[in-house]
Image (cartoon, helix red, strand yellow):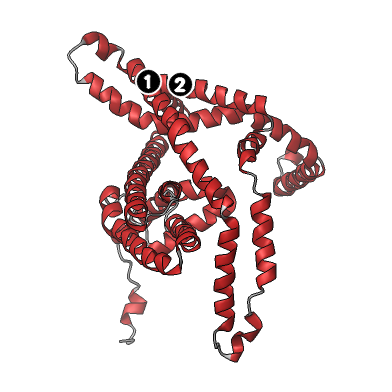
Amino acid sequence: MTRFFKSRMMRSLVPYFILAVGIIIAFRLVSEIGFFSEIFGRFWGTIAPFLTGAIIAYIMNMPCCAIQRLLEKTKNKVIIKRSRGIAVLILIIITIVIISLILNWIIPAAYRSIRDFIDDFPTHIETLEGWIEDINKLDLPAFFDEFELDLDNLVILLTDTIQNFDLENIPATIVAGFGSTFSALFHMFLATVSSIYLLMETTKLRAFSMRFIAAITSPNTNEVILKYSRKLNFNFRQYIYTQTIDGLILGGIMTLFLMLVVRSPHFLILGLILGVLNYIPYFGSIVGTALAVVVIALTQGASTAAWAALIMFAIQQLDGNFIQPRLMGGSFSLSPLLVIMSVTVGGAYGGIFGMLVAIPIVALFKDIIDSYIDYRENKKKEEPLIYNDDFMNRDVW
């Protein structure tokens, strides 16, 4: 019997048996998809606050490390010994101050700007009506006759959109994304507390992760994992740092331009939008500029919007060709086409978050592929050439 199970025929049937078991398991998983979806939903709801806290801790770790390095330069041994805890405390105080400024100055000013724009909506509709009438009166080729703009339907669509947009319900909408007021507050509380503990334990967590990876992998695999983990970490840190500094610069320049030159009453909210959208390469600045031009056109006229658009485009070119490359320092040597494809795919599968993380991840994959190509090319150079005497004796040249 033992010899039968060890026979060549039985060994050849093993892959088919494994395939059959896999099909049965897959069928059961598909048939019970609702059950597993519910389990996954509960699991995700449980760990979501801690994942949020991990993201917050990862971002806040950069300024925290900078503060810690400054504290370690002091000659006070007590401060040096407790530099991490003091750095976290200082960072918490700075964060509270910044949040207070945002809540007491920036958000109310942005709210008033949006409210004023909505209150003046009838005037904007009149301006839009004039534009559409002028466009329809143009002597365009016959090919464009079927594309004549329908003024009534467009006005009704815009009116319904604005009327359904209730500014007071924005906080409720944000809270509804978490489920309820209590769950939202609890989510943020857990995320904040977990981020503080993660900031305090960053060194220990890093050391434990390195020990764990070294314990379960071979030395060569461990070296590769650590190499590309450091590279990915560097990519994310460099990307966040670069886009934040560049967003502050671009947002500040655009805000001053809209305030002092264009004299737009909505300069603050438009500058904020341009600065925040700068985190998304290419598309972010284009969308932000287009939005600003539309608002300027509706509130200050098409001629003002035209020359403002030209200057804003020039500022973007200055930022994209001089300021941003110097901040990047050559960290992301990706072609524009690859960047656009990365952002598009990231947005399709991960939304805004996917757009934000697409560039660092694609940069890592590009480094891995480049390293593999270099390795294969070097291996081919090292392989000796084997000549076939029969082939060499032939008169083929």
Q: How many residues crowd mark 1 within 10 Å: few (<14), some (14–19), many (20+)?
A: many
| Residue 381 appears in the figure | yes
Which amino acid type corresponds to the residue marked 1 in the rendered image? Val
Residue placed most toward the observer, 80 or 377: 80
Farthest residue in the left direction?
75
Q: How many residues crowd mark 2 within 10 Å: few (<14), some (14–19), many (20+)?
A: many
| Residue 8 appears in the figure | no
SS class of the residue under badge 1?
A: helix
Q: Which mark is residue 88?
A: 1
Which amino acid type corresponds to the residue marked 2 in the rendered image? Ile
Farthest residue in the right direction?
31
Q: Position of residue 82 (x, y in %)?
A: 31, 12
Name above or below for residue 273 compared with residue 336: above
Q: Which mark is residue 336?
A: none
Residue placed most toward the observer, 106 or 173: 106
Q: Residue at x 47, y 63 (%)?
A: 297
Q: Earlier in the sequence, mark 1 or mark 2?
A: 1
Q: Quadrant of the C terminus?
A: bottom left
Q: Residue at x 65, y 39 (%)?
A: 169
Residue placed most toward the observer, 219 or 27: 27
Q: Residue at x 69, y 56 (%)?
A: 160
Name above or below for residue 282 compared with residue 83: below
SS class of the residue under badge 2?
A: helix
How many numbered marks are there? Answer: 2
User: In the picture, residue 379 is in which quadrant?
Assistant: bottom left
Q: Is residue 334 left or right of residue 191?
A: left
Q: Quadrant of the N terminus?
A: top right
Mark 1 near mark 2, Cβ–Cβ under 8 Å?
yes
Q: Position of residue 137 (x, y in %)?
A: 57, 83
Q: Which residue is mark 2?
A: 196
